[in-house]
Image (spheres, rainbow, N blue to C red):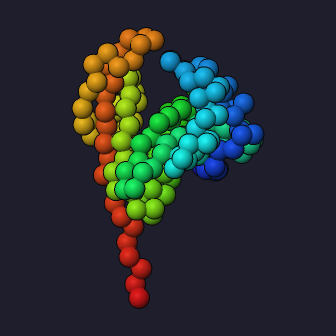
Amino acid sequence: MPGLSLAIRPVSEADLPGLWAIEETLTGPWTRGQLAEELHLARGWGWRAVGEDGQTQGYLFGLSVLDEAEIRKLAVAACHRRQGIATRLLSFVFAQLASDGVRRCFLELRAANAPALSLYQKNGFVIAGRRKSYYVRPADDAILLEKLLVAPPLANF
C-alpha cells in the first residue's frame, strides 16, 4: 500500500527546493519567498512527508496562537496524490496541535477546489463561512473551514 513507509519531518531551509518543485505545479502558487517566510513566522510550523527515497511528497505549513491554529498551506506532489499523504500530514498535525493545547483549527480554500473540500470534510472540518471574490488569479471565492480538536487523554496517576 502506498505511503506505508512515509515519514513526517519538520521543514528546513534545505527542503525548500523540493517544496518549490511541488508548489510551482499548483493553481495560484506561492512564491519562493513566501515559502521561505513560512519558516520564520512567529508561532509558525511546517511539516513534510518524506518517502523512502528521501524526496518530499507533500508538505503542510501553519501557525498557532493560544488555543487556535490555521493551516496556511497543504500540498502534495501530483504523482503522489490520492495515496493518503494529505490525510497522514493532517492527522500528524492534529495530534501535535491537540497536545500543545490547540482546540480549534481553521483554513480557507478556493471554492472551486472540490477535491480539497472533500478531503478536509473527511478529516473533520466543517464549513464556517465564505469570502466572496477573495482570490484573484484565478478569481474565486474562499471557503472557510473549522475543525474542533480533541484534547489528548490525561495520564493515569
For the point 65% across and 44% down, the residue is 11
Q: Mark yes or no: residue 111 visible.
A: no
For the point 31% across and 37% down, the residue is 145
| 151 shown above or below 91 | below
Where does the image place residue 105, in percent across and percent down from the top left? Answer: 37, 47
Q: Is residue 86 left or right of residue 49?
A: left
For the point 64% across and 50% down, the residue is 9
Q: Nearer the viewer, residue 119 or 83?
A: 119
* Quadrant of the drawing holding the C terminus: bottom left
Q: Is residue 135 left or right of residue 14?
A: left
Q: Mark yes or no: residue 134 visible.
A: yes
Where does the image place residue 127, in percent across and percent down from the top left? Answer: 26, 35
Q: Nearer the viewer, residue 80 or 62?
A: 62
Where does the image place residue 154, in percent across and percent down from the top left? Answer: 38, 76
| 28 shown above or below 73 | above
For the point 50% across and 18% down, the residue is 28
Q: Nearer the viewer, residue 56 or 80?
A: 56
- Classify residue 70 by image quadrant: top left
Q: Is residue 50 left or right of residue 64?
A: right
| Residue at the farthest bottom position | 157
Where does the image place residue 148, in percent across and percent down from the top left? Answer: 30, 52
* Quadrant of the drawing holding the N terminus: top right
| 132 shown above or below 94 | above
- Classify residue 130 by image quadrant: top left
